[in-house]
């Protein structure tokens, strides 16, 4: 007998199917706000893509001033 852990154990489920079922149930709560959810995902992607660019732009400034 295997011991279920995590959220699957809380809901009486086990394995990969339990994670999929829980995720699907959580997404059902997001459905009325799908436009805002999509906008927030897009915002996170833009932030993740531009954050390294900011560091790359600042690097020459810092390298030149702290030598």
Image (spheres, rainbow, N blue to C red):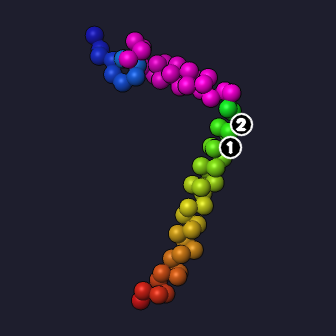
**Residue 58 is a magenta residue:** no
Q: Nearer the viewer, residue 1 or 21?
A: 21
Q: Residues within 10 Å of mark 1 (few under 14, many from 20)?
A: few
Could you say where residue 18 lies in the image, as x and y percent from the top left?
A: 46, 19
**Residue 16 is a magenta residue:** yes
Is residue 62 found left or right of 25 in the rendered image?
left
* Residue that appears at 58% across and 66% down: 53
The residue identified by callout 2 is 35
The residue identified by callout 1 is 39
Q: Residues within 10 Å of mark 2 (few under 14, many from 20)?
A: few
**Quarter of the figure with the C terminus:** bottom left
Q: Quadrant of residue 54?
A: bottom right
Vertical arrangement, residue 33 with respect to residue 44, above or below: above
* Residue that appears at 59% across and 49% down: 44
The answer to whether the residues at label 2 and label 1 have Cβ atoms under 8 Å apart is yes
**Quarter of the figure with the N terminus:** top left
Could you say where residue 28 lies in the image, as x and y percent from the top left?
A: 61, 23
Q: Quadrant of residue 4?
A: top left
> Tag 2's secondary structure?
helix
Vertical arrangement, residue 38 with respect to residue 10, above or below: below
User: How many numbered circles does the render carry?
Assistant: 2
* Residue that appears at 56% across and 61% down: 51
For the question of whether residue 56 can be seen, the reply is yes
Q: CA distance from mark 2 to mark 1?
A: 6 Å
For the question of whether residue 14 can be seen, the reply is no
> Tag 1's secondary structure?
helix
Q: Nearer the viewer, residue 39 or 50?
A: 39
Magenta stretch mostly in which secondary structure?
A: helix
Q: Which residues are magenta?
A: 10-32
Q: Which mark is residue 30?
A: none
């Amino acid at each position: 007998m295997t011991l279920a852990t995590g959220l699957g154990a809380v809901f009486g489920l086990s394995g990969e199917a339990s994670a999929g079922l829980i995720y699907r149930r959580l997404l059902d709560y997001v459905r009325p706000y799908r436009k805002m959810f999509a906008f927030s995902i897009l915002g996170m992607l833009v932030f993740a893509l531009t954050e390294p660019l900011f560091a790359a732009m600042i690097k020459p400034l810092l390298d030149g001033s702290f030598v």
